[in-house]
Image (cartoon, grey):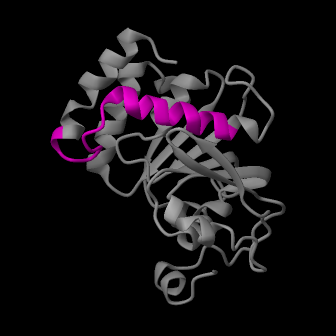
């Protein structure tokens, strides 16, 4: 868990994000608690404790740094890549990263996950991909799968209303497992294993994904 000093520093760092409506009204303690359960879901896929987890995590649609910045603080040996299409939101993530002193393990990148997934420096180079508010399950899995190496995992904070959609996995187009569910007092987490390299045609362009969702 974070220390009282870290919580206070993070709260101060995120004050502008809260004023701007980027992270909502939940107190920092609640955001940290949610991310603790997120980290447990990630680590359970590798049968590892927080201290035992060594891997690279990409957080797509991180916004002000949720959950990525807090994951970096909770998992002391993890490397994090935080991605968002809004430079303005990423300014809040940078501020939070400095507040928690995790900048040496956190790379913050302005970009779109579906575009970076076709970059050789990103494609298949992560042990874990996470997302908190990325959207539709079919859209999420298609964007994230190619970022993860075979044997890695995608872990999502999932809405209870979307469980039937997630349970449609796997689909023939993508070599993934079916979904594994982690229940917690703060909500549901869906984990999906990537079983083999993702075909080079994925992820498709946004218009195509929306016209013909995978499931």
Residue that appears at 76% across and 42% down: 45
Query: Residue 172 sits in which quadrant?
Result: bottom right
Q: Is residue 154 left or right of residue 161?
A: right
Residue that appears at 37% across and 23% down: 98
Using the image as rendered, state which of residue 173 and residue 158 is in the foreground: 158
Q: Is residue 17 magenta?
A: no
* Residue found at the very far front of the displayed protein: 185
Using the image as rendered, state which of residue 200 and residue 55 is in the foreground: 55
* Residue 58 on image: x %, y %: 58, 46
Q: Look at the image and tell me whether residue 92 can be seen.
A: yes
Q: Is residue 120 left or right of residue 82?
A: right
* Residue 126 on image: x %, y %: 68, 47
Residue that appears at 33% across and 23% down: 10
Split into 4 quadrants, where in the image is the C terminus?
A: bottom right
Q: Is residue 25 magenta?
A: yes
Q: Is residue 183 left or right of residue 100?
A: right
Q: Is residue 41 left or right of residue 20?
A: right
Residue that appears at 61% across and 60% down: 144
The magenta stretch is 19-42
């Amino acid at each position: 868990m974070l220390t009282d000093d870290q919580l206070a520093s993070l709260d101060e760092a995120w004050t502008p994000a809260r004023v701007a409506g980027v992270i909502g009204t939940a107190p920092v303690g609640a955001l940290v608690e949610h991310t603790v359960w997120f980290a447990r879901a990630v680590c359970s896929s590798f049968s590892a404790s927080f201290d035992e987890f060594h891997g690279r995590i990409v957080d797509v649609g991180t916004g002000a740094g949720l959950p990525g910045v807090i994951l970096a603080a909770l998992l002391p040996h993890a490397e994090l890549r935080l991605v968002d299409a809004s430079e303005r939101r990423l300014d809040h993530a940078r501020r939070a990263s400095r507040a928690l002193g995790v900048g040496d393990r956190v790379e913050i990148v302005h970009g779109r996950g579906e575009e970076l997934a076709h970059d050789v420096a990103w494609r298949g180079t992560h042990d874990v991909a996470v997302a908190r508010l990325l959207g539709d399950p079919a859209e999420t899995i298609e964007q994230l799968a190619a970022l993860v190496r075979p044997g890695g995992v995608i872990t999502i904070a999932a809405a209870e209303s979307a469980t039937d959609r997630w349970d449609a996995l796997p689909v023939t187009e993508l070599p993934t497992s079916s979904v594994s569910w982690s229940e917690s007092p703060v909500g549901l987490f869906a984990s999906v294993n990537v079983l083999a390299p993702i075909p080079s045609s994925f992820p498709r362009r946004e218009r195509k994904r929306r016209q013909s969702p995978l499931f």
